[in-house]
Amino acid sequence: MPYASLRDFMALLEKEGKLVRVSEPVSTDLEMTEIQTRLLAEQGPAVLFENPINEHGEPAKMPVLVNLFGTVDRVAMGMQRKPEELREVGETLAFLRQPEPPASIREALGMLPVLKNAMSMRPKTVRGAPCQEVVLTGDQIDLNNLPIQTCWPGEPAPLITWPLVVTKGPGNEKADNFNLGIYRMQKLGKNRTIMRWLKHRGGAQHFQRWKKEKTEPLPVAAVIGADPGTILAAVTPVPDTLSEYQFAGLLRGEKVELVDCKTVPLKVPATAEIILEGYVSLDDYEDEGPYGDHTGYYNSVEPFPVFTVTAITMRKNPVYLSTFTGRPPDEQCPRRSFKRGVYSSTSATVPGNR
Amino acid sequence: MKKAYPGHAKRVMMGAWSFLRQFMYTKFLIIVDDDIDARDWKDVMWAVSTRMDPVRDITKIENTPIDYLDFASPESGLGGKLALDATNKMPPETHREWGEKIQMSEEVVNKITESWEKLGLPGSGKPIWK
């Protein structure tokens, strides 16, 4: 059975001693980063900070989960697989991006099960979802109520580090289907952030196509904390023509359940923890950064479009999922080791790669 | 090395290869700044991947003396040398704004070291910063 939610996965991790609770107050300002770097260096557990303190020294309103996928073991667990089985996931992915038609009928028949699987994994829409137990709109919206981490000294503002950003293109082609990507979001105020999607990423591609056809801002939803299959699908490089929601279904072996957002025409995972609904402006840009990045240095400042929140929906007792990026090892490394499995099995597209 | 002027790394390369006769058997050199631990391969590779351009910062020399035991060299006793300049670049080596290294504040590092036991977390809790 796939994990229905992040908390399902957390419960199993805790039972196996792979998630530890910290009741001591810990600040979202630098302290969580420092603790996670030490845990990562020794393949330590995931941590739930039960009493986080925000950057103003006040107790935060919800716990913070870090180092969730800090080991290859936990990445594999998130996919309900053993570490040595990750390669198969890569092979499925290599197959899905294969540009050539099958060479023979036999080969075509061999593909059928995978294709059938991929097709049957279209997400289904449900009504009444845990991620909408609480709905905050208008003046109730205040990002200061989220325990958003400040990862490194000298950074300009707290940073939402692990949002699954949901977008949809302007049309009905496959490439316009739901895309999930992780783009860091610099907090600007109570209801505004910057959306830092790099030009070649799925969200930015949707944004560009949208901008050509439309004048109104692009609807966007940022999912913070979801079931592990959906999170891992979102960090996996899948072909543009395959929605990450569908790939998540394939990974989980069960369809992803989605719910309609309250204020934007998008769908989000029903069992998620926190959702930020809103719009990305087509012409309002702000300077983003400098933030510490996986290179081990601070990025240079670049302008990116502004995201305005129209609703925050969440569970009654939500968990805020966070991480940091910094000089390796950081939490992206175990995820990259999964990608390495993907690349090593791209024999379908790279001549001579076997 | 403690880089003091543009091109300094190249001088170090040439110096290393020329200093004593035995040094000419060194086929490969990697030059790093003094904040990098030359005996820590991870540290060195971090400098290589972040501080050098694979085309601009490579020095190749042909037909240099080499140990005849080195069967990979094109001629017995005569072969090439390669050096990587993985130092931070300064104008006019680069005209771009250069990266500033991330460093956790000492105050936070010390605070977490002191409170590690109280946090109840497993592991040595040793800081990663040098």
Image: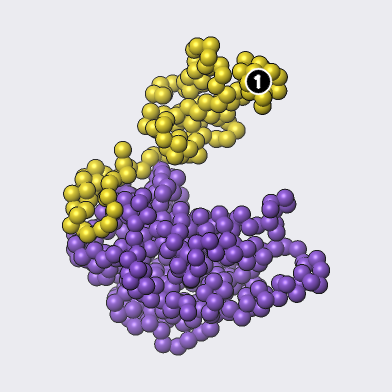
Chain colours: A purple, B yellow
Q: Which of A232 and A202 lies nearest the eye of the viewer? A: A232
Q: Which residue: 28% across, 45% down? A: B127
State the image coordinates of residue A284 (x, y, percent, origin top left). Answer: 45, 60
Dot 1 amino acid type: Gly
Q: Which residue: 33% across, 78% down? A: A315
Left or right side of A222 for B58: right
**Mark 1, residue position:** B79
Left or right side of A110 for A157: left
State the image coordinates of residue B82 (x, y, percent, origin top left). Answer: 58, 26
Q: Which of A219 and B3 lies nearest the eye of the viewer? A: B3
Left or right side of A8 for B126: left
Which residue appears farthest toward the right when viewing the image? A104
| Image: A227 above or below B120 | below
Q: Residue under mark 1: which chain is it in?
A: B
Q: Which of B79 and A145 lies nearest the eye of the viewer? A: B79
**What secondary structure is found at the residue carrying circle 1?**
strand
Q: Which residue: 49% across, 17% down? A: B16
Which residue appears farthest toward the bottom when viewing the image? A127
Left or right side of B47 for A113: right
Q: Residues within 10 Å of mark 1 (few under 14, many from 20)?
A: many
* Res. A244 visible in picture: yes
